[in-house]
Image: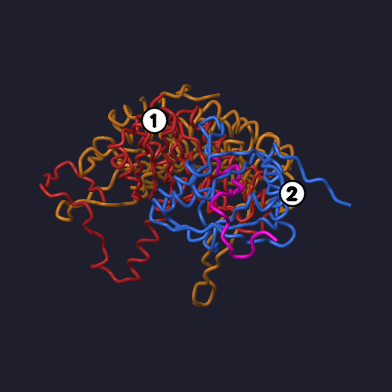
Chain colours: A orange, B red, C blue
Amino acid sequence: MTGKVASQPYKRPPITEAVIAVQFAAPVPADDLRKVSRRFKARYPGEQEVKTLGVHVVNPPGGRSPVTNVQETVGHRRASDDATEIVLFMPDTLIVSQLAPYPGWTSFFTRFVRDWKLWKREISFLRINRLGVRYINRIDLPITKDYVEQEEYLNIYIQLPEVLGPTTSYAAQAVLNMRDINSQLIINTAIVPSPLLNHASFLVDIDISRTQDVPQRDEDLFELLVKFRDMKNMVFEACITDRARELFLR
Amino acid sequence: MIEIARPSQPRAATSFLGRDTGLEHVVSDNTHRIITRYADALRKRPTPGSLEAVDAEKDLAERLFDAIAAAKMLTAQVAMHLDREWRDKIFQQLDSLHDADEWQADDEPIRQGSFSTFLKAMLALRPNRRPGLGLSHNGQLVAAWTTDRDRLTIEFFPNDRVRWVLVRYIEDEPDRFAADTPVSRLGEGLAPHHPEHWFVR
Amino acid sequence: MKGGRGKNVPDDDHAIRHVPWARLRRDEDDNVIGFLPQAFQLRPEEEYLSVNWMEYHDGDRDRQMTLSIWGMRASFERPLGAKSAFGIASVATIKDISQAAGARVRVTHEPDGDRNPGHAGIRQLPRDDLNLLEAIAADAFIEKVNNADIPDEPATG
């Protein structure tokens, strides 16, 4: 079950992180989360507690002013020895993540299936209310002049009136419905600080998810993930030009 | 800063490097802050690899582990540009430098800013011969190459700065050179001293 | 009694300094080939670079070196790492190299009570002169002794 494009076509894919996230309708108690994290120790020896911040705005009745609650959520992140394979246990989410170098979908998906099965053995059934796949790509363009012609490499960028002059930075988000798979696509694109000298770096962050009619059976879940991956590939290929592909093939 | 060109934009003769073209003069400070926050949020949506470890009282082993884990995750940001063999070697060297049994009290583990500068330098210089690595007492990574009596040592600081010193023996007399520069000028600074003497096998 | 706090260590004598594993100069395969300049860098709170005066102790050179190392081991908070080492330099060479770089250093006796009576310090060492530190690392501290090669001090009593 590897999808339409089984092999990794690029020698150096620009993927910095690939994520499969399963969100549940109810949170797992903290003690149970700690216990399940320990069960993954053999596969992911390194453990850290991590925190995320969530901002919730509550509109009280009676026209009173909105109340902003900032909540810190603590989870358990486990990683392989080389820190490229990660599993993250948050109270309401299981996340399996792969950092670069990306080993290919087959390897990543196989690991997810393995971890999902272990998770299910440890935690009794929880209704899934969101399933998502996210691939964060960073396209590093060598700078050979004092400007970068992004359209030579990317089909996704912002377009501004010429009278405004050259762009030095931007960030943009597009949200699209993927009706044929009853899912939502979010694409984030931005210029980001480059970790390489003499390069300009562009983010193409592709997030595909479903929050309605989310499959609950494993077979259906896995099938949907493969569809997400195929869709992600289509989106990514549509966002780049052949000139960019040459960079990933070197 | 690098200018991003659009298809129909005629090329200007003058470079725009360094020119401030932000919104600072157009909107209020508060609006500018809000816009900056939204833009940052779009750029930096958190991922499992980017989440910070909880800041709690930790013992030495935990502190060393956190530092190495963070360095390895930082390496992942550029792993697509690194040979697997070199990446593995860097990890072995990092593990070795942070051996709890060898740790000196009051030393700092590797600073992420220093490691980031090191990665930038190595990906630009691409030495065929890899360096030996060391760590200063305050967590700055040090790379060292030695060819016979000739030595090149580079210390990596946060904020993309480096300090290097080299010694070459000419007719048994040492010639010493040192500099403190941005990492972007490291290659240029080393060029007159034939760095291939250390970098090429 | 030899020396005294703040008194100069004779030029003919030797300074010995502990260098942890992280500041040993190594090749890409972690083979040790010397000392990094950073091994001789002052920490912000230090007013002198901590060394031991080898000839404070009586006996032949090996005995003096061993007693110095035992003194240093006693004065460190944590046991010294098995892969760490000690560098030995002639006081005269330290001073000559420093003078050539425009720095007039002094090596003074700084006894640390009974546990490390041979403790000394290199004073007036410039903090940020990487050229000088490189020269001290490579041309002054030319002798290396592995910590693992020196046995533990026998327990007394």
Q: Position of residue C59 (x, y in %)?
A: 72, 45
Q: Name the quarter where the C terminus of chain B is drawn.
A: top left
* Residue at 47% in and 42% down: C139
**Amino acid under disc 2:** Asp
The local crowd at label 1, few if under 14, some if 14 to 19, many if 20 or more residues have their Cα within 10 Å, is: some
Residue A32 got which mark? 2
Q: Position of residue A226 (x, y in %)?
A: 52, 30
Question: In front: C12, or C76?
Answer: C12
The residue positioned 53% from the left and 43% from the top of the image is C141
Q: Which residues are magenta?
A: C1-24
Task: Provide the secondary structure element on which disc 1 rests.
Answer: helix
Q: Which image quarter: residue A1?
A: top right
- Tag 1, which chain? B
Please indicate whether residue B47 sits to the left or right of residue A14 in the image: right
Q: Say which quarter of the image contains residue C76.
A: bottom right
Q: According to the image, label 1 marks what residue? A: B199
**Residue A25 visible in the picture:** no
Q: Is residue B60 above or below residue B77?
A: below
Figure check: A152 above or below C3: above
Residue farthest toward the top in the current orientation of the protein: A7
Residue C36 in the figure: left or right of residue A145? right
